[in-house]
Image (spheres, helix red, strand yellow):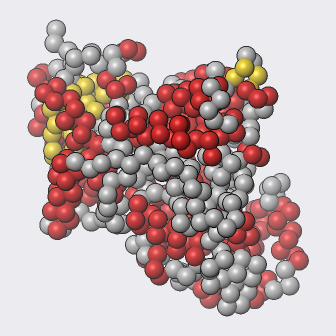
Amino acid sequence: MAPRTHWLFGDQLGPHFLDPRHGGPDAHSPVLMIESRSVLRRRRFHRAKAHLVLSAMRHRADELGDRVHYVRAQTYAEGLAEAGAGVGGHRLTVCHPTSRAALDFVTARDEVDVLAARGFLLPRAEFGVWAREHKGDRLRMEGFYRWVRRRHELLMDGDEPAGGTWNLDHDNREPPPRGRPTLEAPAPYSPAEDEIDDEVRHDLDRWERDGEVSFVGRDGPRRFPVTRREALAALRRFVSHRLGDFGRYEDAMLAADPVMSHSLLSVPLNLGLLDPAECVERAERAWRAGEAPLNSVEGFVRQIAGWREYVWQLYWHFGEDYRNRNALRHTAPLPDWFLDLDADAVTANCLSTTLAQVRDTGWTHHIPRLMVLGSRALQDGWNPAAVTDWFHRCFVDGYDWVMLPNVVGMSQYADGGRMTTKPYTSGGAYINKMSDLCAPCAYRPTDRTGERACPYTAGYWAFLHRHRTALSANHRMARAVKGLDRLKDLDQLLDESAQRGGRAP
């Protein structure tokens, strides 16, 4: 019997998606790939993201050569029809897709058999067992992370965590070095574009010119890997040259150094070009060889084996209704300056700088995402579903499974605490401590009112006031809420905040 054709989605591009072990496709199975134009028409994606995904898909097709049937169609349904049901009369196999919409689509097709998910450390069933053991509702990342480390023997010395402690966050929260515009870290891996990138750019230009699609953000040289070879080179360079300084400054921000010592590996991981196990194992080997400090390695392992895995599992565990959670009842629309990535319309230096980074590259690291962009949305009461959609569209590593828990649960506290213990927002003092963004700003992080009032400082207190009743019952927020009683200028602060409305801060 001829081998069955295997369908590869655009975020299933690594060799582990064509591995015959564990019930996967045969080593010589024909491969189907469908480039669906409707995906780009449905949302106004960042131009760099559209380029990245199409480039990655076409590069993978080029690698597979005659083995692949690459279909360019308006929709996935049309692509399947053009390829022939099952291609040549055989049923298709496909690895479990990463979005609920894609899973619903493939499970509704009689000719498609869905295999187990790949590209993650744990099967969904194993997480379900852990969740039931932990009462299912309030599932904290720290407990999950320790369980994964034990399960995969990551950074473990027997039954104990390496170094005697599970969590080295206290060593990984240093502010940036004062007086230095950059960390002076070795540059990250930088790919070279080729004729496939040229073809993608030409197609995107034509589709946009013809009015078929519309993008946000700027195009530019490709910054992230789109092939397995490039992804491995990026991983090697990070571990060998950048991992050492990653931990201590992973929460810091510098205006002239948006990348700092971050790995930039979320993109190849989320395209399926890297497997998370190989990333964390390579980092652990560097520590055991004395080539990287434990705090940096633990911080990196925590991001992948902890947070990334946790978010993936919660996306499925919480179900589709999670998308509509809005515990704080925030309904304000996203303002045009934010939707258009109009950094020039913004006066606040931290927000303008971060928005420009998104506009120009489709990427910032986790602290600008959470404490600048997400905090602005939370303080101003923007609709969490719209905020989730914005992050999905505007970040090159953004997918539904990534952004739904990250934004609804972590960033916007729209789930009322199912995922995190408190809302993540702050006044300007935190941004001032952890960055060099406040000194040149027109606003002062210490000012709550007046012409130089920091929109984050004023916004923080206005947010606490607006949700005082709910947050006073939160043990991690009760002390901050009580601080409202000490503000003699609270009425003025609230009046000024109301006057600002949706204007760019």
Percent x, y for residue 303?
Answer: 59, 41
Q: Is residue 186 left or right of residue 488?
A: left
State the residue at coordinates (17%, 58%): 202
Tell which residue pokes out farthest to the right in this image: 486
Answer above or below: position of 265 versus 431: above
* Residue at position x 45%, y 63% in the image: 358
Q: Is residue 391 left or right of residue 419?
A: left
Q: Closest to the observer: 387 or 180?
A: 180
Quarter of the image that includes the N terminus: top left
Q: Name the image quarter holding residue 48.
A: bottom left
Q: Is residue 141 left or right of residue 268?
A: right
Q: Total label count?
A: 0
Q: Is residue 471 visible?
A: yes
Q: Position of residue 150 (x, y in %)?
A: 67, 22
Q: Position of residue 336 (x, y in %)?
A: 43, 76
Left or right of 351 in this view: 188: left
Give above or below for 449 relative to 101: below
Residue 312: % across, % down: 52, 38
Which residue is found at the position 32% from the left and 42% from the top?
226
Q: Quadrant of the C terminus?
A: bottom right
